[in-house]
Each structure stands twice: as C-alpha cells, then as structure tokens.
Image (tube, rainbow, N blue to C red):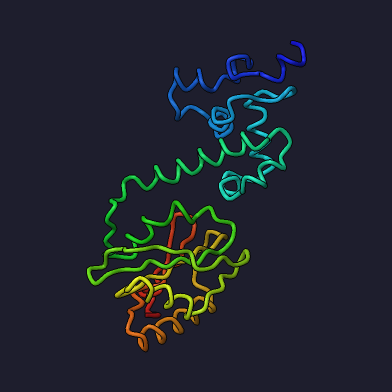
Amino acid sequence: MDNLSAKHTTLREAPPDEQPREKMLDLGPDSLSNAELLAILLRTGTARETAVGLAGRILKESGSLGSLVEMSIEQLTTIKGIGPAKAVQIKAGIELGKRLARTSIRDEIIIRSPKDVADFLMEDMRYLQKEHFVCLFLNTKNRVIARETLSMGSLNASIVHPREVFLAAIKRSSASIICVHNHPSGDPTPSPEDIELTDRLKEAGDIIGIDVLDHIVLGDRTFVSLKEKGYL
C-alpha cells in the first residue's frame, strides 16, 4: 500500500478482526469493545494505524472512558492522529450519547424524591473530573423550570457562594431550589465543607424566602441526600 492509499485506510480495509462496522452488523453493538465503538466514530485511521488502533491509543492516552468524555476539542487534538475533524466527531458522539441517556426523562421534570434528582443528572455529572455545583430551580409544584451550573471547582473542591445561588434563583422567580454537586472520586459521602455550605444555603434561603429542598452529592451511580441525612 503506497503512502496515499495508506492515509485513507478505512474500517473495511482493516484486518478481519479489526472491522468493527461489519462486526456490529453481524453481532450487534453489544459485541463491540469501547475501542471498536470509538473506531466507528473515527471512520478512518492514520498512515500507520487502523481506526481500531487509533481508537485504542486515544483511550489509553486519555486515561479512561470517563476522562475522554471530559476532554475538550482542543485537548483531543493534542493526541497524535486526531485533527479538528476527528475531535468534532468524537465530541458529537459523546454529546449524542448524553442526550440519548436523558430520553427516558420527560420534558417536564417533577421532583418528588432525591432519586428523581439523581436520575435526572447522574449521566451528565458522574464522569466529570472536577466538582461542578448545579442548581435546579423549581416552581410551586416542584417542576424544574431551569438548571444551571454555577461553579466548577478543583479536583476535590466545589466553590460557590450563597449570593450566586439565590441571585440565579430570584432571576428565575423560583419557589425553591435543589443544589447538586458531584464528587469526582465516585464516593458521595458529604465532606464537612459540604455540610457547612448546606447550612449557609438554608439560612440564606430562609431569609430570602426561597426554600432549599435538598443538597445532593453525586458519586459514581450512587448519591447522598443531605436532607435524608438530617442536615436540612
């Protein structure tokens, strides 16, 4: 194969054990590895790698599938063999997956329990590598009227001030709010800082007249409600 044709290596031109598109057609999507699924998004490899080889290296260099989800287009293009076009393909696939994960949630979200909050936000937040502090703004019937990420912290700290939370709530004429943040470690056990922040938010809400219904900490497929723990 000359250099020109090598640069246009397609999935079909890869060795038989590296043809994920055909494998999916024959055996279904569940039969594919993460690298094979990513290879389908990439469509082509490089002059020296098949699409599957390139996909495997991307997963290795990113560190994990969760880390890949968090990477920006600019970060993706620092990986050898990934230009802007392939980076956009990857990000588009990830975003479509996120939206698909939410399709079982009705457009009109009514919060009746902490689990409803976890079901609504878990797939969006459990892969994040930094703490994100998110507020759900509710009307008098506990319907979610808006959602906003108010801060992004370091690896193990989320920084938010009550004034930012309630300024956003007042702008939306919220009757109540639910605060949510993730723990990148996967362990949702509230820290002393989480408990202290919850106390400050409750005090501010009582003064302003906007109820803080809960503060929920998300881990990896698990969560803790500070209200259920008796902190609200």
The quarter of the image holding the C terminus is: bottom left
Give percent across and percent down for residue 142. 26, 67
Q: Residue furthest left?
A: 141
Residue found at x 29% / y 58%: 109
Q: Where is residue 201, by image quadrant?
A: bottom left
Q: Where is residue 38, by image quadrant?
A: top right
Left of 77 or right of it: where is 123? left
Image: 201 above or below 125: below
The quarter of the image holding the N terminus is: top right
Residue found at x 33% / y 79%: 211
**Residue 138 or residue 69, whichever sits in front:** 138
Q: Residue furthest right?
A: 3
Give percent across and percent down for residue 6. 72, 17
Give percent across and percent down for residue 4. 74, 15
Give percent across and percent down for residue 14. 63, 17
Q: Residue furthest top?
A: 1
For the image shown, how many numbered marks are present on the structure?
Answer: 0
Residue found at x 59% / y 32%: 35
Image: 48 above or below 176: above
Q: Residue furthest bottom?
A: 207
Residue found at x 45% / y 75%: 165
Q: Where is residue 48, by image quadrant?
A: top right
